[in-house]
Image (tube, coloured by chain):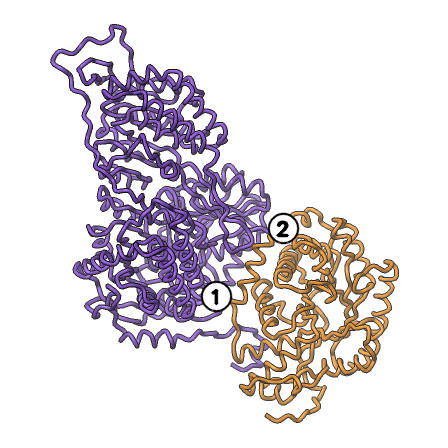
Chain colours: A purple, B orange
Amino acid sequence: MEIEQVFETMDYGPAPESAAEALAWLVDGGDRFGHFIGGTFTEPADGFESCNPASGEVLATLSQATQDDVDAAVDAARKAQAPWARKSGHQRARYLYAIARLIQKHSRLFAVLETLDNGKPIRESRDIDIPLVHRHFYYHAGLAQLMNDELPGMAPHGVCGQIIPWNFPLLMLAWKVAPALAAGNTVVLKPAEYTSLTALLFADICQQAGLPKGVVNIVTGDGAVGEMIVNHSGIDKIAFTGSTSVGRRIREATAGSGKALTLELGGKSPYIVFDDADIDSAIEGLVDAIWFNQGQVCCAGSRLLVQEGIAEDFYTRLKARMDNLRIGDPLDKCIDVGAVVDPVQLKTITDMVDANTEGQTYVAKCPLPERGSFYPPTLITGLSPAATLMQDEIFGPVLVGTTFRTPGEAVALANNTRYGLAATVWTENVNLALDIAPKLVAGVVWVNATNLFDAAAGFGGVRESGFGREGGWEGIQAFLKPAAKPKALKPIAPHARPDEPEVADPLDRTAKNYVGGKQARPDSGYATPVYTARGRLLGHVGTGNRKDIRNAVEAAHKAAGWAKTTGHLRAQILYYIAENLSARAGEFATRLKDLTGKDGKAEVEASIDRLFTYAAWADKFDGAAHGVPIRGVALAMNEPVGVIGALCADEAPLLGLVSAMAPAIAMGNTCVLIPSEPYPLAATDFYQVLETSDVPGGVVNIVTGAHADLAPTLAGHMDVDAVWSFSSTNLSAEIEKASTSNLKRTWVNNGHARDWAGGHDAKTFLRAATEVKNIWIPYGE
Amino acid sequence: MGETMDIQDTNTTVSGAALPQVGHTRNPGMALDMDWVKSVQANTSAIERRAKTLPGRRSVKKAYQAAWLLKAITMIDLTTLSGDDTAGRVRRLCAKAAHPVRPDLLDALGMGPITTGAVCVYHDMVETAVNALEGTAIPVAAVSTGFPAGLSPLHLRIEEIRESVKAGAAEIDIVISRRHVLSGNWKALYDEMAAFREACGEAHVKAILATGELGTLRNVARASYVCMMAGADFIKTSTGKEPVNATLPVSLTMIRAIRDYHARTGYRVGYKPAGGISKAKDALVYLSLIKEELGPHWLSPEMFRFGASSLLGDIERQLEHHVTGQYSASYRHAMG
């Protein structure tokens, strides 16, 4: 090109980043790679090719792991785990620090290799992915250092199976490996088959850092290898990032296995622009939202909601901006949009968009490269909420949009989705922003910004976007469990009907369900008798069925205003419940004695104590302002989970119920409680206490019945947000399996006992009763 | 590379040196639209993020870079605004404006002659500069209206413009009254700007907002709109005398205003960042910012200028590096 010509055209010209060093690294490895097991690379075996999506060229041949490989990796991880966990936090911190430094030193090699393998623009791998990776290891070196002091009584799970996606290959590895190692776990990780190369380079780094053998193991392969990890009996915890459909299968496969699970799944995150926003900045934000990484981002702002009055102007400007995007060779330093990860993904995107017949489609007028997997930036406006493309994740550079009239309507449209990963809000009105952010059903909210990430702030979703957080103090929790060894919980059967039951008090008291603040007869019209140990008929309780559960859940939702009450008010009500329980302490003690045969006084006192505990916490379980590296704050707010269903402890009929109810309602949840199955009458007495304690109708609902009958309905109910089971009937598998309907959070006992009277771990209950929402608010005028 | 200095034949076509907006319709201004001004928003954090990531998003290399740097030279308002300016100093500057790059370098680059966009001086030096630039097409720009503070009596400020125009200045760089912005007196700002524009007559007027003294980007944006509505041909960041001069966030704010004004009225207003731009690399970033946010129409001296004194030297060294592959030294290039 003649300089004089460019002087006139002012074209950018090519600005290629050299691939030489990365290709040399592949050549050094023989272009063929085995697995990284027990600190060494295995001999390359039969496998599959890893290609550059921008050119279709083969980069390397990788091995498909067999069951033997996975077994060997798990064995190596198991052997390494105890010594690794025994190291001091400081010793683990040194290794994590070394890894961080090494990644930083080789940052360009990682960035180029990532771009070659994945197709993302070099700008992104160089300026975003890799810096976030070493930041993550630095941060977790710090957590390892502080863990013993700050998180006493906690222990690692053991061996973590980790399955990561192809959209941020090394970053997702960092999100999984760094906290696992910090907490004292060892790891068997499977990268996505499209993008395993940086994971293999990471293995190289682990060797260089002198990481003890077996602490990190990496096996390559397709979904079948993932299944081997998920189903492996030697693995204690599964952490998965990927699609909601695979996440659901993993939940099903691990149900009842006792494996801990965190899922970071799909999304269809709303991007809300109010009419007082800085429009040009909001449009530039969309470039970072949906055209970042070709839109292959789980938290991409892919659903544009614009206030009606500015929509036309907004769309006009947006289209002009789209035309200015540069799409092409991802290694070019002047490229905005790179290649879609694989022709298969390209076809998925193409088919989804082609199948759409609604709205107006605008395709950016930027030229596409002649070969490689490229899809043009696309905007589809005028879609109704029912349109498939408004509901389903496209995972490509396709933005769909519609308009709204009021803040209320914006929230309603934003939340009209099965997902709940992230949300973006643009407004110059701080009142509006801070009003909207808590109302959005999402794990992360960005105000006047989008796709901000940092190791110090937890990331993760609600609803079908999964559960668990990655990053921050909230994220490390997922890699820890209580250090105490659990004891088995024996099933407790109701006292049997004697041949000649003692006659009950002739003045019969009718115990009903308690739904929406009213005593309700069971739908079934059946009652179950309750006897003392000696065979005295104490009374009857309703035999609850699925319709009672339905009604109770409905009532719990109607009481959703409870979440908006102040902690102070909720505390007052909990104290009032304690006060009224105390006034009837004698009666309850007698009842408990009749039911369980044990002295009831202590249980009543413990229940009053527990109510005080959660009354105290109601206005003290504070969130945090994370120290993220921007001028702004990331507010980690503890929000209620929503509607919590709990199968209460059989062995402690009052204390078990109170221990589940109190943290739930203290944090603003409403709940459906299924009381002790053998000893339900303490709970039915208790609703009279609730009735006299100003508890709003629907905040606490009680349905009596057989746990095994009611659990599947409760766990499968798609409008229940969490299910807890402390039942002595081990329903863990059924509950976890049924929970896949809406991927609700589950907290089950796996047949383990809990000491209800002593050593109550309030924090565990409070964490289960809350979701951390990180609200990012950059500021500055 | 030879280092003989050829005297360029001034009859050949020279790139650069053109009045603002040749070939464009001059922005006639419009009635003050307060609804529009008040609706303007500028989110500082978001604007800073865009400005910060831009250099990583755009990269111009090798021959393309050389071409861009040559273009940048044609956009420079080569400036001297010192209390110790003399006729000799100004004449030397004018000579540099006419021959900003060593001819052997231009030859090696395959480029014809170029000049800077203009020469920018105080009123008292206008006549000297005009004489020195006779025979070139390089316009003389005069800073005016009580530059840099703009606090002399209004009638004197207006008169100063008339004097400079009379002395031969083709461009007038006026300073706005910052107090009108800071007190939200947009009507006063509009009237002042309109009066300046009127006094300029055929000369083109650049409105210096002194953005470093306006407090917020929102103020920068609103002041930009008001000055354009009052008929500014160019809006310009700074006098070079404020504590903070041209920055990328300020530039982004101002050029987005220009883009919006063009979209609504059809008139193109030019942009001039001034002060603090001294490196070739910075110039490339600015040019890519303009290309990205305003489009190719603005990549010409008619629509875009750098207010800079030391930028040219760095560009010359970069050009020599491009030609020889060796890093250059400043003494190898003629001083201005």
Give the amino acid at mark 1. Answer: Arg
Q: Quadrant of residue A720?
A: top left
Real-space Cα distance between discs 1 and 2?
27 Å
Q: Where in the figure is residue A459, as x and y percent of width and height?
A: 41, 49
Return the chain for callout 1: A
**Quadrant holding the N terminus of chain B:** bottom right
Which residue shows up at 70% across the image and 60% down it? B212
What residue is at 17 percent from the left and 16 percent from the top?
Answer: A534
Is residue B151 left or right of A216 when viewed as pictured? right
Tell me the number on the disc at residue A703.
none
Residue A554's place in the image compared with A632, above or below, is: above
Q: Point out residue B198 in the picture as x, y percentages from the top left corner.
A: 81, 61
| Neighbourhood count class around disc 2 (C-alpha, 10 Å): few under 14, some 14–19, many 20 upward | many
Query: Which residue shows up at 31% across the image and 71% down it?
Result: A59
Under circle 1, the secondary element is loop
Q: Quadrant of the C terminus of chain B?
A: bottom right
Q: From where the camera sits, is residue A163 visible?
A: no
- Work out whether residue A353 or residue A481 is closer to the camera in this orientation and state it: A481
Residue A9 lies in what quarter of the image? Answer: bottom right
Q: Position of residue A136 (x, y in %)?
A: 41, 58
Q: Which quadrant of the structure image shows residue A767?
A: top left
Q: Is residue B78 left or right of B315 when viewed as pictured? A: right
Residue that numbered label 2 is attached to: B41
Identify whether A260 is placed above or below A564: below
Question: Which residue has dot 1 on it?
Answer: A326
Query: What residue appears at the point 82 percent right and 58 percent down from the top-left corner?
Result: B195
Q: Chain of mark 2?
A: B
Report the front residue among A610 and A354: A610
Q: Is residue B284 left or right of residue A550?
A: right
